[in-house]
Image (cartoon, helix red, strand yellow):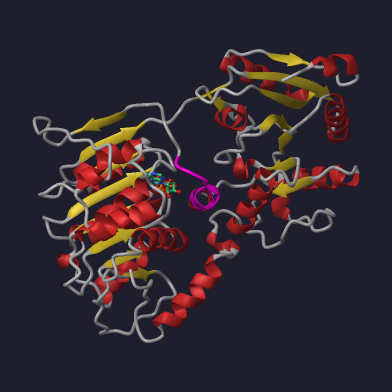
């Protein structure tokens, strides 16, 4: 691919500007739904805002972007890929090598240049279907990091006719930043496909009316794509050959996006190949997928289950926050801790704890909801690199951070939902490990006396024992090993 071209005369400059901004993706807070604060965490605790007392809201699009930014490699799975064919009597192909796909030479070169040696588990099944003639529709679900984006980018690149200078592949993404991320993969994989070009239909990319759009791959958000197709007539949907709807679970979580996507899909020709991807598959995603993808094949790869089996869990009864901190210090002083993650329920608590620990000379970092995604990614990276030993955080990153060397998790506050009932799923996500990687771990719960019934419910729910620990009994603490 010659370059990542932007449309219009001012295009190159705009592309340049965005690309340079890209490395530090500053996301105005208003883009992160549900998070309204504009203050940056202030570890001296002086700048608390009202939001500090609220739970951090988990933002699906921001989390998805964070996952992409911090991902180091393919996420492997021990599960088999489940396939539901549109036509069960047709043979089911799977491939073990990229050569078997008979791709264009320059595309194969691009794949190898990305360091891919063989198809990932989901790609083994999905690629033959996606590249088949006649084209087949597909709904694919597998957890983030299993190779979905690489698969549909490969399908788009392989279907472009470079002699035709008009949009042929259309990919919808839930946010501007996620669209740019996909574009980056197109750029890398298509590095040797010099005549294939990409264009972004995202806010801020102003194309004059009547411009002849010659780029073959369009990646954009539903609102802007709709505008470009129907109002501004920049894209002729009847000429689209491949339609990709990425991150369907995030998409349906955004108001208006399902309807806009459906309007776009309805205007596509019947022979257009339609592909939908999602990391999760609740009923709502499934219903949407069935509405938007006609006659689909379905591929699913189950996620590794989290388990508490290898985790020794303790609790300490405390009077108040200060008391919890003292207990934490005793534990910290009594056992050798590699790296630890400490979860707090509110930003205010997380800030307070960070200040206390820093004042006591610990190397800690704070990860909470008011940070941009890019700032979050860099904090996680520093922690992974061992630059800080303790990461203090709120629910904002209960999921998705995979730091292998963390052996201790502390619930400074128990996870509870809005009804003040235990949030079992979050507890499991904070502490659990996949059975397959089965490393041992320790979990400590700091509990005010009135919260003890919640802990007991958690114990019953998981049918696992949570042992009481006396924080004054250093002999007992020192006996804990992991
Ligand atoms: N066949 C492969 N071999 C090695 N690495 C791969 C392969 N396919 C993808 N990867 C790499 O694995 C990581 C995850 O891939 P990809 O982004 O395609 O997954 P995904 O399922 O789309 O994740 P998400 O849902 O977060 O977008 C990326 O770093 C990608 O470059």
Quarter-of-image position of residue 15: bottom left
Q: Position of residue 422 (x, y in %)?
A: 62, 27
Task: Say if 457 sits above or below 393 in the image.
Answer: above
> What residue span does the magenta drawing correspond to?
64-74
Task: Say if 424 sits above or below 380 in the image.
Answer: above
- Side of 65 where 122 appears, left or right: left
Q: Is residue 263 visible?
A: no
Q: Is residue 71 magenta?
A: yes
Quarter-of-image position of residue 403: top right
Q: In this orientation, which residue lies closer to the viewer: 264 or 296?
A: 296
* Quadrant where the N terminus is found in the figure: bottom left
Q: Magenta: predominant secondary structure element?
A: helix
Task: Say if 93 sits above or below 381 in the image.
Answer: above
- Side of 447 where 1 appears, left or right: left
Name the residue rendered at 41%, 85% in the picture: 10
Tag count: 0
């Amino acid at each position: 691919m010659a370059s990542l071209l932007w449309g219009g005369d001012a295009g190159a400059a705009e592309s340049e500007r965005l690309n340079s901004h890209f490395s530090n993706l500053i996301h105005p807070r208003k883009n992160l739904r549900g998070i309204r604060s504009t203050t940056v965490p202030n570890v001296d605790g002086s700048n608390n805002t009202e939001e500090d007392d609220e739970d951090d809201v988990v933002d699906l699009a921001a989390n998805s972007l964070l996952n992409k930014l911090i991902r180091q490699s393919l996420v492997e799975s021990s599960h088999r890929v489940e396939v539901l064919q549109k036509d069960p009597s047709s043979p089911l192909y799977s491939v073990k090598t990229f050569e078997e796909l008979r791709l264009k030479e320059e595309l194969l070169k691009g794949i190898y240049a990305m360091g891919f040696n063989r198809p990932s588990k989901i790609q083994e099944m999905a690629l033959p279907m996606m590249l088949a003639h006649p084209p087949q529709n597909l709904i694919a679900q597998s957890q983030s990091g299993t190779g979905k984006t690489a698969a549909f980018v490969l399908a788009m690149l392989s279907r472009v006719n470079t002699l035709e200078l008009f949009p042929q592949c259309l990919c919808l993404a839930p946010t501007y930043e996620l669209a740019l991320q996909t574009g980056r993969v197109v750029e890398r994989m298509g590095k040797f496909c010099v005549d294939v070009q990409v264009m972004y239909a995202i806010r801020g990319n102003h194309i004059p009316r009547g411009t002849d759009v010659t780029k073959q791959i369009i990646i954009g958000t539903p609102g802007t794509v709709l505008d470009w197709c129907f109002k501004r007539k920049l894209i002729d949907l009847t000429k689209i050959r491949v339609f990709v709807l990425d991150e369907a679970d995030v998409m349906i979580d955004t108001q208006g996006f399902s309807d806009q996507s459906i309007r776009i899909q309805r205007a596509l020709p019947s022979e257009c190949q339609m592909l939908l991807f999602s990391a999760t598959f609740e009923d709502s995603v499934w219903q949407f997928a069935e509405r938007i993808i006609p006659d689909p094949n379905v591929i699913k790869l189950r996620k590794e289950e989290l388990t508490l089996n290898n985790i020794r869990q303790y609790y300490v009864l405390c009077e108040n926050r200060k008391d919890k901190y003292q207990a934490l210090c005793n534990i910290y002083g009594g056992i050798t801790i590699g790296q630890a993650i400490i979860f707090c329920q509110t930003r205010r608590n997380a800030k307070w704890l960070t200040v206390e620990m820093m004042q006591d000379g610990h190397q800690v970092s704070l990860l909470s909801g008011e940070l941009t995604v890019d700032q979050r990614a860099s904090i996680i990276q520093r922690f992974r690199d061992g630059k800080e030993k303790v990461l203090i955080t709120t629910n904002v990153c209960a999921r998705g951070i995979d730091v292998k060397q963390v052996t201790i998790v502390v619930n400074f506050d128990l996870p509870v939902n809005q009804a003040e009932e235990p949030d079992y799923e979050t507890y499991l996500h904070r502490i659990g490990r996949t059975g397959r990687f089965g490393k041992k771990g320790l979990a400590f719960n700091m509990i005010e006396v009135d919260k003890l019934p919640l802990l007991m419910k958690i114990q019953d729910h998981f049918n696992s024992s949570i042992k009481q620990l006396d924080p004054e009994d250093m002999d007992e603490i020192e006996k804990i090993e992991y």
